[in-house]
C-alpha cells in the first residue's frame, strides 16, 4: 500500500490538485505495480509564511 505525501505551497486550484493526484497515482502504479486502489496520496499545503529558502520566507519575496 504505497502512500505518497506531497508538500507544497498553498495556492493551487482544485483542478491542479486533482491532476497532480491522478498523475502521481499513475506514476506509482507504473513503477511499483501496485493497483491504483492501493495508492494513497496526501497533499500537505503550507502557507507561504511557513516556508523559507536561503533565509527568506516565500511570503516576503
Image: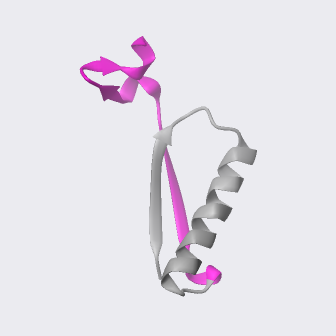
Residue that appears at 54% across and 86% down: 34
Residue that appears at 46% across and 77% down: 2
Q: Quadrant of the C terminus?
A: top left
- Position of residue 50 in the picture relative to residue 9 (left or right): left
Tell me where residue 20 sits by quadrant.
Answer: bottom right
Is the residue 38 above or below the residue 57 in the image? below
Q: Residue 52: image x %, image y %?
A: 32, 26
Looking at the rendered structure, the number of numbered marks drawn on it comes to 0
Is the residue 1 above or below the residue 7 in the image? below
Residue that appears at 60% across and 86% down: 35
- Position of residue 26 in the picture relative to residue 43 (left or right): right
Q: Residue furthest top?
A: 60
Q: Residue furthest right?
A: 15
Tell me where residue 5 sits by quadrant.
Answer: bottom left
Q: Residue 8: image x %, image y %?
A: 48, 42
Q: Which residues are magenta?
A: 36-61
Amino acid at each position: 500500500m504505497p502512500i505518497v505525501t506531497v508538500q507544497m505551497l498553498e495556492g493551487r486550484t482544485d483542478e491542479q490538485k486533482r491532476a497532480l493526484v491522478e498523475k502521481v497515482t499513475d506514476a506509482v502504479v507504473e513503477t511499483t505495480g501496485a493497483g491504483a486502489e492501493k495508492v494513497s496520496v496526501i497533499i500537505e499545503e503550507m502557507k507561504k509564511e511557513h516556508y523559507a529558502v536561503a533565509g527568506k520566507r516565500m511570503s516576503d519575496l
